[in-house]
């Protein structure tokens, strides 16, 4: 039997086209055509709702709902979105990277959440800290970029998260820290990311000791805190933009794209050198395994893969199948969720070398007895199922 959460997810398998548009603001840009669930409503991904720190994006009674008035502009939803359908702009990736490098002291960078900054007040050396609304804003393209720049210690500093309305944003920060450290280890880098509570010693203003800063933070969080909601512009009747859906291409697949963040991350890893470990398991990539015994050769996996990590091939000799490019996988789970035969497994471990070298896995499939997408599909299917040809068209 399904538990309550699984049951809610199953009921949420309905079109969400236009729903996410409510998130769009100065802080978040929505690219609806990239959303795995917009591309196919049977995809289970609801990572944005799971990670949202304010309740702006939530699963309510089996429906994905957006209440823009609750958004605090933290960008945590953009961090967990595998396809970058949500893009953080408060600050942008480039602005945050520049802020981090400007606040760099030696080989260390401190990133602090807004509530810690307020708690510390003048005890914090603003010139030594990069600020974000919530630590959930930090992602692996940022941490790897800092490592390439020579930063070896990246400290993500928060206040008393148990006393903050955005308290579970730190869970995303810890996930990003763990993923970053796993990648650094796999590439033989000594850079590390650490989530810390309170003001790091190196970020205190001159003459302020750690105990004084800790006392100020404790006093501030004597009551529950939280970030202000983003200003929401009143809706203008009839001004809503027309809903644009991805158009099917000539090969029967939806358009592919690789998120800028993912390309930046791969570029950064390449600059860190050659990997020293044979495998790594993270939240970012998956290795697709197709069970040839169960596969029906429908190639829906390729049709709905958002990045082209799974692509069709049809050779002149009649051979057909799919290619799998692990380096372009974003682990959205679309291939697994849309497979009608449950023939796809998405492994957590991938070979780092595959990511850099653009390795390709080739799956040859058995041609289908009924050609899909033709006017004859229904008739041919009935003839196949009834094992006879006594079915006529009119």
Image (cartoon, rainbow, N blue to C red):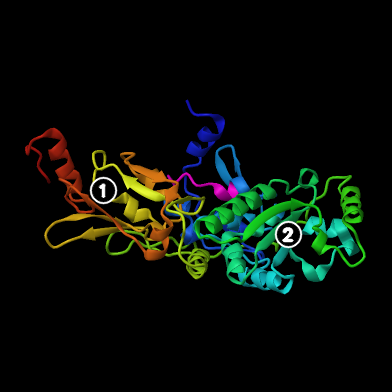
Q: Residue at x 91, y 50 (%)?
A: 215
Q: Is residue 9 above or below residue 108?
A: above
Q: Callout 2: few (<14), some (14-19), or many (20+) C-alpha neighbours within 10 Å? A: many
Task: Confirm whether residue 191 shows in the render.
Answer: yes
Residue 376: x %, y % from top left: 16, 50
CA separation in Å, label 1 and label 2: 45 Å
Mark identifier at residue 187: none
For residue 264, side relative to residue 156 (left or right): left
Q: Residues within 10 Å of mark 1 (few under 14, many from 20)?
A: some
Q: Which residues are magenta?
A: 41-49
Residue drawn where x is 37% and y is 54% of the image: 304
Coordinates of residue 355 in the picture (x, y in percent)? 42, 60
Q: Residue 212, percent across and down?
A: 92, 55
Q: Which of the two discs, 1 and 2, sits closer to the camera?
A: 2
In terms of depth relative to the viewer, which is nearer, 209 or 216? 209
Q: Return the x and y of residue 357 as percentages of the image width and height.
A: 37, 65
165 relative to 363 in the view: left or right: right
Q: Is residue 75 visible?
A: no
- Residue shown at 59% from the left, 51% from the top: 178
Q: Which residue is mark 2?
A: 133
Residue 141: image quadrant is bottom right
As drawn, is 54 to the left or to the right of 346? right
Residue for point 55% across, 48% down: 47
Q: Is 1 left or right of 228, judged from the image as shown?
A: left
Q: Name the element at disc 1.
A: loop
Q: Secondary structure at mark 2?
A: loop
Q: Is 31 inside the magenta-drawn segment?
A: no
Q: Earlier in the sequence, mark 1 or mark 2?
A: 2
Label for residue 298? 1
Q: Residue 43: say if magenta.
A: yes
Mostly what secondary structure, the magenta segment?
loop
Count the marks: 2
């Amino acid at each position: 039997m399904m538990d309550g959460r699984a049951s809610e997810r199953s009921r949420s398998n309905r079109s969400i086209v236009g729903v996410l548009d409510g998130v769009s603001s100065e802080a978040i840009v929505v690219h609806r055509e990239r959303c795995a669930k917009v591309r196919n409503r049977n995809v289970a991904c609801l990572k944005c709702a799971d990670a949202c720190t304010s309740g702006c994006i939530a699963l309510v009674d089996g429906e994905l709902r957006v209440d823009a008035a609750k958004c605090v502009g933290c960008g945590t939803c953009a961090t967990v979105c595998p396809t970058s359908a949500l893009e953080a702009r408060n600050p942008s990736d480039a602005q945050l990277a520049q802020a981090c490098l400007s606040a760099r002291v030696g080989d260390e960078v401190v990133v602090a959440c807004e509530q810690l900054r307020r708690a510390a007040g003048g005890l914090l050396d603003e010139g030594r800290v990069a600020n974000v609304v919530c630590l959930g804003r930090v992602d692996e393209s940022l941490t790897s970029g800092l490592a390439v720049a020579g930063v070896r210690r990246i400290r993500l500093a928060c206040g008393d998260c148990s006393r903050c309305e955005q308290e579970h944003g730190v869970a995303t920060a810890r996930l990003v820290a763990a993923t970053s450290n796993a990648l650094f280890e796999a590439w033989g880098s000594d850079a590390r990311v650490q989530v810390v509570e309170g003001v790091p010693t190196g970020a205190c203003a001159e003459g302020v000791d750690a105990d004084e800063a800790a006392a100020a933070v404790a006093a501030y969080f004597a009551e529950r805190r939280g970030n202000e909601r983003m200003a929401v512009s009143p809706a203008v009747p009839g001004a809503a933009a027309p809903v644009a859906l991805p158009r099917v291409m000539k090969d029967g697949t939806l358009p592919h794209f690789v998120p800028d963040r993912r390309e930046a991350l791969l570029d950064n890893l390449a600059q860190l050198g050659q990997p020293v470990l044979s495998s790594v398991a993270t939240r970012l990539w998956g290795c697709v395994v197709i069970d040839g015994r169960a596969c029906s050769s429908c190639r829906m996996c390729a049709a709905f893969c958002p990045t082209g990590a799974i692509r069709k091939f049809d050779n002149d000799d009649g051979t057909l199948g799919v290619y799998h490019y692990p380096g372009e996988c974003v682990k959205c789970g679309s291939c697994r969720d849309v497979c009608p035969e449950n023939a796809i497994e998405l492994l957590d471990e991938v070979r780092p070398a595959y990511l850099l070298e653009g390795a390709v896995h080739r799956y040859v499939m058995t041609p289908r007895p009924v050609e899909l997408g033709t006017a004859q599909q229904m008739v041919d299917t009935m003839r196949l199922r009834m094992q006879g040809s006594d079915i006529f068209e009119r």
